[in-house]
Amino acid sequence: MNRRDALARVGLLLGGTIIGAEAFLSGCTNAPEKKIGGAGTNFSTDDIAFFDEVAETILPATDTPGAKDAKVGQFMAIIVKDCYTEADQKVFIAGIQKLNDACKQKNNGKSFMDCTPEERTKLLIDLDKEQKDYTAKKKKDDPAHYFRMMKELTLWGYFTSEPGATKALRYVAVPGKYEGCIDYKKGDKAWATS
């Protein structure tokens, strides 16, 4: 499966387009490091650890690997830096602070990284409701919600990674003959290869 097919499938999972996907497919790279609102897009290891924790809260490890195992935090940093427009980068970077501020307000001053997995999950459920309301009401030219960006990048990064494609989905490295109709039983994993 090529990246275009994988991206289309992830887009279907999300019910729409992925922010930055066109730039990713066209292979563009933004200009070297720009400062955006005082912060650059050269994310630190602490930033990547933060992205990993957000992603792991969205897709935790169960009987399949979680988002941290797929190194989704590193994927987020690369896509935001190389594929997002400057406007989307600003929204994403501001969203990091907004997420921490929301966490502190909800959890007695504790930052996201200091919260328990349960506290993180409750916060992200609230932010997901907020982004769904925002997305439903936003005008065409309004920026995307920062949490939607984080969630999309988590799903995109996870399901296009080796652990996501081979452990969470059904995967055949070298598929055999073409079978146009394969029975699907409730609970079967989706296919990573076609």
Image (tube, helix red, strand yellow):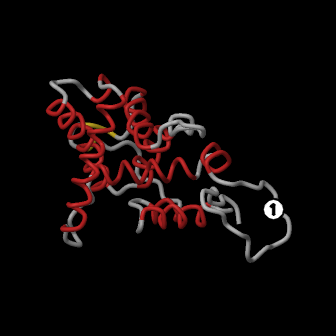
Q: Amino acid at mark 1?
A: Pro
166 above or below 115? below
Task: Give the quarter of the image for residue 65.
Answer: top right
In-front residue for pair 88/105: 105
Residue visible at 45% across and 37% down in the picture: 56
Q: Which residue lies at the image location 25% right of the left edge and 50% below the top edge?
A: 91
Quarter of the picture holding the C terminus: bottom right
Image coords of residue 48 (percent x, y): 42, 33
Q: What is the crowding at mark 1: few (fewer than 14 residues within 10 Å), some, or many (at least 20)?
A: few
Q: Nearer the viewer, residue 132 or 48?
A: 132
List the single residue furthest toward the front: 186
Outermost right residue: 177
Q: Which x, y percent locates residue 40?
A: 31, 38
Q: How many marks?
A: 1
Q: Quadrant of the N terminus?
A: bottom right
> At numbered mark 1, what does the secondary structure look like: helix, strand or loop?
loop
Q: Which residue is mark 1?
A: 175
- Left/right placement of residue 187 relative to residue 90 reads right
Tell me if 51 is positioned left or right of 161 in this view. Answer: left
Give the image location of residue 131, x and y in percent: 25, 55
